[in-house]
Structure formats: structure tokens, C-alpha cells
Image (cartoon, rainbow, N blue to C red):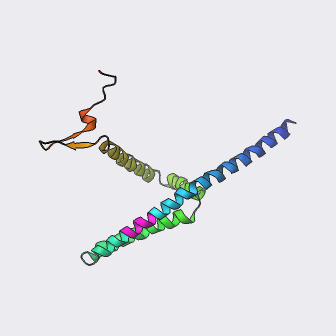
Amino acid sequence: MADKIAAKAKEFGDKLGAAAVDTAEAIGEKPKAAGADAMQGVGRAVRNAADQIGDDAPAVAEYVRDAAAGIDKVAKGLRDNSVGELLDMAAKFGREQPIVLFAGAAVVGFALSRFMKSSNGKSTPQPDGETVREADAFPHNGGIGG
């Protein structure tokens, strides 16, 4: 009797897990497609930049074209792979290249912190030429009125 209950529970758990994966993949498809479209747009912009500098600096333009080809490859990978496959590839990359993954995460974290710090209040130019940020002009002192 206990074996039958355990088997039913396992079967239910397997079905529930499969449904959760299917739902997560379905939810992730729309942002994934939008990401692929955005990457494709970046690739076009980079390729246009290469075309503009091609006459003045052909060697640099070739590097920029190579970068555009890499961006196009990433966009194609986003478009052609399922969310689950992308997560599997990311996990595999993390296992194979943990230092690169850590360094990338550190760079992204640094960039986000700089962005958040720079957008931490509006800047207001003053008549004397200095700029005062709202966050500096009205510091939070932890209490109401004092």
C-alpha cells in the first residue's frame, strides 16, 4: 500500500514538474523573442557603424564587422533555442568557465551600481555653475522632521 502511494506521489510530482517547466518555457518565449530582436537591431547598428568607418579605417571596420557577426550569432542562438536549452547552455558555460562567468557578473554588477548611483537623484544646475543633486540637497536623515 505504501509503495502504491509513493508511486502515485512520484507520478504526480513528475507531472507537476513537467507542467512547471512547460509553463516557464512558455512565459520565457516572448521575452526571448524580444531579446533576439533587440540583439539583431544591435547587430545592424554595429554593422552600419562599420560601414561608416570603413573608408577611414578599414582594419577597424573589419573588427567591428566581426563583432556584428558575433552579435548576429547570439541573436540566432536566442531565436533558435528554447528557454530550457538556453538555461542548460548557461549552466554548462558556468561549469566550464566559472572565472569568466564570475568576472562577467562582477562587471555587470559594477555597471548596474554605477547606473543606480548616477540616477540617484536629479541634477540641478545652479547660477554659480555648480550642480546640486536632489539626493545631496535633501539627504534622508532617518526620521520625520529631524
Is residue 118 magenta-colored? no
Q: Nearer the viewer, residue 55 or 136?
A: 136
Is residue 40 magenta-colored? yes
Q: Position of residue 7 (x, y in %)?
A: 81, 43
**Quarter that holds the C terminus:** top left
Q: Position of residue 30 (x, y in %)?
A: 55, 58
**Quarter that holds the N terminus:** top right
Furthest residue in direction bottom, as rendered? 55
Q: How many numbered marks have been drawn onto this rendered protein structure?
A: 0
Residue at the (31%, 42%) spot, across then down:
117
Residue at the (51%, 67%) spot, across then down:
76
Q: Quadrant of residue 132?
A: top left
Furthest residue in direction left, as rendered? 128
Q: Nearer the viewer, residue 3 or 45?
A: 45
Residue 96 appears anywhere in the view: yes
Instruction: Give the magenta range.
Output: 39-45
Q: Quadrant of residue 70?
A: bottom left
Q: Position of residue 115 (x, y in %)?
A: 34, 47
Tell me if 92 is positioned left or right of 101 in this view.
Answer: right
Q: Position of residue 133 (x, y in %)?
A: 24, 39
Image height of 23 relative to 4, above or below: below
Q: Quadrant of residue 43?
A: bottom left
Image height of 49 relative to 115, above or below: below
Tell me if 44 is positioned left or right of 59 in this view.
Answer: right
Residue at the (32%, 70%) spot, across then down:
49
Predominant secondary structure, magenta span: helix
Residue at the (57%, 54%) spot, across then down:
28
Residue 89 appears anywhere in the view: no
